[in-house]
Amino acid sequence: MMMQRCLKGAQIPAARSVGRHRRPVTVCSAAAVHTKSVSGTMSELKSKGKVAFIPFICAGDPDLDTTSAALRKLDEIGADVIELGVPYSDPLADGPVIQGAATRALEKQTTLDRVIEMVRRTAPAMKAPLVMFTYYNPIMRKGLDNFCRTIKEAGASGLLVPDLPLEETVSVRAACEAAGIELVLLATPTTPQARMSAIAQASQGFVYLVSVTGVTGMKETVSNRVEGLVRNLKAVTDKPICVGFGVSRAEQAKQIVEWGADGVICGSALVKALGEAPSPAEGLQAMEALARSLRAAVP
């Protein structure tokens, strides 16, 4: 999609001849931001019989330049969709690893505006659509419509707000749709079937199925209950189901694929590899090695 910025009523001088007047016209300059939709990517994968590999990293940990390099590396190795977390002081849905990453990023003055500027420099050259992951308070402070327009112009394709209940999504989804952003919603193991159906109907791009009751983090095993949750969701929607929370190893990713998921999301393990290494260069190497093993496990 080609975004355009227009200056309405700009005064453009007419030809230099007597009696000619200047008249207001609309001047548009094309911003070369081509974004691939999340739903389009998922549909394309389904048509090829493939499952999406969706990595997550936290912006600003260890620094924004490394985040940019990590996004490019994940795109290079074949991530189908990439989630980028905006650091927040009270990340209720996140476990110790991502909380630690967010704290380190905030200590280095990683603001929402700086994250967006990094996205603006990085996303236009990426093949994979980028989904911004942020809590609602930073959105509210920036202004809902302004936030959605700004991240779209920067190159984002989707938005995920983990502390936004279904009942509060109407205005956010409207703002997202006006800006050309897809709003991804979450379902959990404790979500009743009827509510799960309503979440699936409202979600765009894919439905994010949380595999555990609790917060993000690396787990030794992925609960067998996930297989039933995937089946229950598929009974009420034909939208792609992507499973996250707790996925840290290739064998776990393979298991989720066998259970019928349309995508596998990995966050904490990649965040830990990238942000807790002795140096940014070593972090990028560790993240890449893990991401490649997970990519190989997701056909």
Image: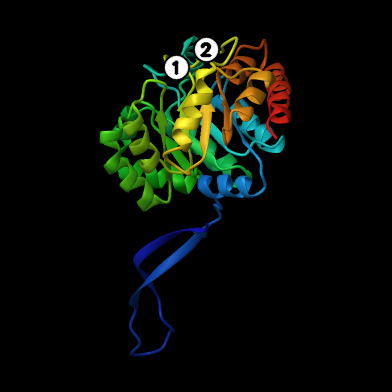
- How far separated are the C-alphas under marks 1 and 2? 8 Å
Q: Which residue is pictured at 58% across the width and 32% down the height?
A: 260
Q: Residue type at mark 1?
A: Asp
Within 10 angstroms of label 1, few (less than 14), some, or many (20 or more) residues? Answer: some
The colouring scheme, among rainbow, by chain, secondary structure or one colour, is rainbow
Q: Which residue, given by chain and number where applicable, does mark 2 sit on?
A: 97
Furthest residue toward bottom: 18
Residue located at (53% from left, 32% from top): 242
Front residue of 17/278: it is 278
| Number of the label disc, if any, that sits on residue 145 | none
Q: Are marks 1 and 2 in contact (CB under 8 Å)?
A: yes
Q: Nearer the viewer, residue 215 or 240?
A: 240
Quarter of image, res 164: top left
Residue 59 in view: no
Q: What residue sits right under mark 1 in the picture?
A: 94
| Position in image of residue 97 (x %, y %) | 52, 12
167 and 181: which is toward the camera: 167
Question: What residue lies at 53% left-to-right and 28% top-to-bottom?
Answer: 243
Is 64 rendered above or below residue 239?
above
| Disc 2 crowd, CA 10 A, few/some/many (<14, 14-19, 20+) | many
SS label for mark 1 = loop
Instruction: Give coordinates of residue 70: x percent, y percent.
Output: 64, 29
Q: Say which residue appears at 37% left-offset and 17% top-offset.
A: 92
Q: Position of residue 85 (x, y in %)?
A: 48, 27
Give percent across and percent down for residue 100.
49, 11
Amino acid type for the residue under numbered disc 2? Val
* Quarter that holds the C terminus: top right
- Find residue 289 and report its image quarter: top right
Is 134 placed left or right of 284 in the picture? left
Disc 2, SS: helix
